[in-house]
Image (cartoon, rainbow, N blue to C red):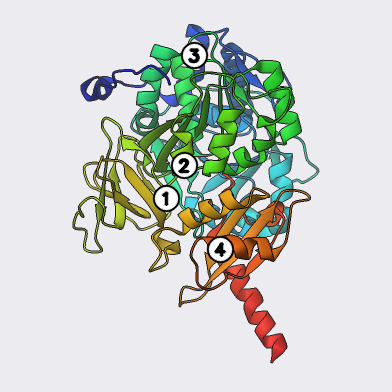
Amino acid sequence: MPSTVDLNTDVLATLRPSAPFGAMPGLAADKFPDAPFLTDGAWPIAGRTVTTAGELAGVVDDFADRLWAAGVRAGDVIAVIQRNHVEVEAAMCAIGKIGALPALLHPAMDPGEMLECLARLGTARVLVDADGLAHLMGVRNALRSLAVRIICWSETNMDWVVPAVERGHHVASPRGDDEWFVITHSSGTTGTPRLAAHSTRSLFGMVAPNVMIMRAQYDSHDLSARHLSWVHARTIAGMLATLETGTSALAITDPRPAHVKDVLLRHRPTALETHPNIFIQWEVLADDPDRPLASVERFVSTFDAMHPRTVRTLLAGSDKPGAHYLQAYGQTESGPVTLGIIGRDQAPAYSPRNVGYTGPGYEARVVDPGGNPLPAGEIGQLQTRSRGRMRGYVGEDVPMIADDEWWPMGDVGRMLPDGAVELLDRVADHVDGTDSLLEVEDSLLDRLPELVELVLVRTREDGGLVAIACPRAGGDRRAERFDKAVAELGFREPIPVRFWDWEALPLTGTYKVRRGVLRRRLAAWAAAAGQEKS
């Protein structure tokens, strides 16, 4: 297990970002010019290779020059829609250096929902790459009516798109630490994504403990590899921590297991972070005779709980004696609130419902529907207070509560006697009479190793369930195996199951299943089937 660091609350309270985020790439280049900042492929917009913090700062300045020539100025709101590549964060830094406000929208978002987000932003400019522009061509008329200007990183044959290919000397005017620096969005698992604004200071609040740990424990031999949604608040905060500490980073764009194997064998990272549903795809690497996971000591997932089977499998793929899995609980609006560390000894008994303990400066409690705190062991709704809370929703008439007030997480859970937090379900998905549907999903996945995902969806007002099961390529699709596993868990009635390819699931940019969309699809199909029968 990793050595401990004294995360004293008083010391953490004194930590401040070294500079406004827009100025951080330049500051990092001055302090750590040769710190490795690697990717698994080309930077198509930059048109150059980036391998160090110094080269990253050069790209940020070049992007700022191109955006300045395209008319971007301090105070502008810029919606950024481009391929999920770390370049999007370089664009964010360039926009922030000018003093404009970037709003990062994941390219996997439904075009209709993107238009809704643009409407909430008001008078925004839209910045796209070729992929982003192609994604929006089906709604281009609506796009043109909503956007003040549409800017593309490359030349196009459309006279309504401004190419950002020329360069002008930009004027740096970074936003202050407490001003809104970036707008990002929630995952949208249960509905339309919401836009949340963060400042440099709120983003730093997400990673201040991590900054202390990185400064104390990481050295030149450590390399942190990540395949993430680069528009997510957690990832943006992670970029801030990387620039603040000068630690080595490797951004992975292509998550296919064969490609990731080659990347891991080439660079041998000591930390590996991705989304839980991508780690499931990477389980096959643990059994690979070339041992691509051998060098990994820290497996990190801060976006959602990971299935126990996946945790055990990944740890078995590492050759490091202190290999462990690090899990955090939080959301776009709150930042991380709890942290759990699971080593090999704890892995056999690991429950992903236990999301660990609050850190210094972070609090959690469970309340009843009236907002009254509940004792340990009783199920209610989770509320938190944290340093990394957003600064406000955008485009909604929702007043932001004070920093010292409790934030509703929208989750059902309970406090355990030892002070750990147990996350049971989203409020929108909770079924009366069942403590946790998520726990049932985990138990079924343990019994059905041929599956890479299993989702239980409540489709009727009476709490009826339908299972969506996603086998690996060539995996077993027999309902009998699923029915047997359900019966072993004590269900009196079978749960109807549909077998889908994983790629067919409606997913967020962080690869979470959009349960609300899935529920509506299943209801529509059921209604259509009923009409056909009648």
| Quadrant for the N terminus in the image | top left
- Residue at the disc numbered 1: 394
Residue 332 seen in this snapshot: yes
Residue 475 placement (x, y as % from top left): 74, 51
Q: CA distance from mark 2 to mark 4?
A: 42 Å
Please tell me whether residue 462 is drawn above or below residue 111 in the rendered image.
below
- Which label was assigned to residue 183? 2
Q: Secondary structure at mark 1?
A: loop
Res 115 quadrant in image: bottom right
Badge 1: residue crowd in 10 Å (few <14, some 14–19, many ≥20): some
| SS state under label 4 | helix
Residue 86 appears left or right of 196:
right
Element assignment for label 3? loop
Which label number is shown at residue 47? none
Q: Are marks 1 and 3 in contact (CB under 8 Å)?
A: no
Q: Is residue 236 above or below residue 105?
A: above
Tell me the residue that label 3 is attached to: 246
The type of residue carrying mark 1 is: Val
The mark lying in front, picked from 1 and 4, is: 4
User: Which amino acid, by three-letter code, is at mark 4?
Assistant: Val
